[in-house]
Amino acid sequence: MYFNQRPKWAYRSLAFAALVATPASASDLETFTVPIWTGVYAGLHGGMNWLDVDSNAGESMSFESGFVGGHLGINYQVGGLVFGGEADLTYETAEASETVDGAAYGYPGSSAKATASNTASGSFRARLGVPITSTAMIYATGGYAWTTLDYRLTGVAGGTPFDVGSGSTFGGFVYGIGAEALVTPNIVLRIEALRYDYAEQAFSLPDGQQTNLMFDPSSDVIRAGVSWRFN
């Protein structure tokens, strides 16, 4: 069974852009060159992940889940630009399953249940920000990302039950946009819209079954967070 409840990426991006496009006042413009964003920060984030997993066995599973995580980064402001780097780690419990033809996995004459689950992900990203008021900025971000994917196949072939599974880590790219606002000199609130595209990768099940199975995951993420500035 295939199901997809994920909102369209374009619609979410447009809504996000409209949210952060707040006009700046004349007094705000005078403060853009003050390096208030320079410094080290750490924080927590949470949100929703819409994940797609496609395979060369004819599957296309889509599922969504909430998640929580942490991030650590550094900013350096030069005039009206803010350069930065950030690392993050996220924990989630996303899972989806569907009925598949067991023959595509080396179990002819059987109907099987395929289950994919995602438990952790992370990234190392560069950031480029532009202040839009004296205490808020918008930014673009991009870099390397990774995610874990576990896969399990269960069913009965020739009267004999089978239950095989494997796990792997996928690497790829992440890119997106965000906005941050200072609520105190040390506390920053944020919201981000991110796209993750992972490289296609071979995925082998135990006992030599379907050694040429290929998976191609991707996901869209909306998340909010709070950071503490140490400067």
Image (cartoon, grey):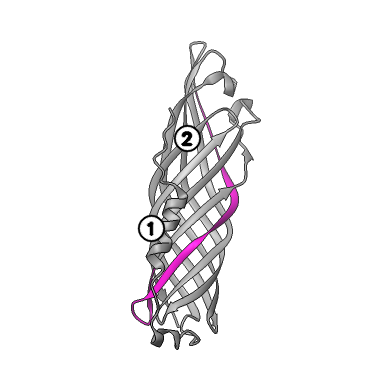
Is 207 above or below relative to 92? above
Q: Residue at x 44, y 84 (%)?
A: 29
Q: In terms of image quadrants, where is residue 13? A: bottom left
The residue pinned by badge 2 equals 61
Tell me residue 189's x, y (percent). Answer: 37, 70
Give the x, y percent position of residue 188: 38, 73
Q: Amino acid at mark 2?
A: Met
Determine the residue positioned at 42% across, 71% down. Answer: 180
- Which residue is disc 1 drawn over? 46
Give the structural element (helix, strand or loop) at label 2.
strand
166 vs 126, nearest the viewer: 126
SS under mark 1? strand
170 in magenta:
yes
> In which quadrant of the rendered image does the C terminus lie?
bottom left
Label annotation for residue 157: none
- Image: magenta residue range: 163-190
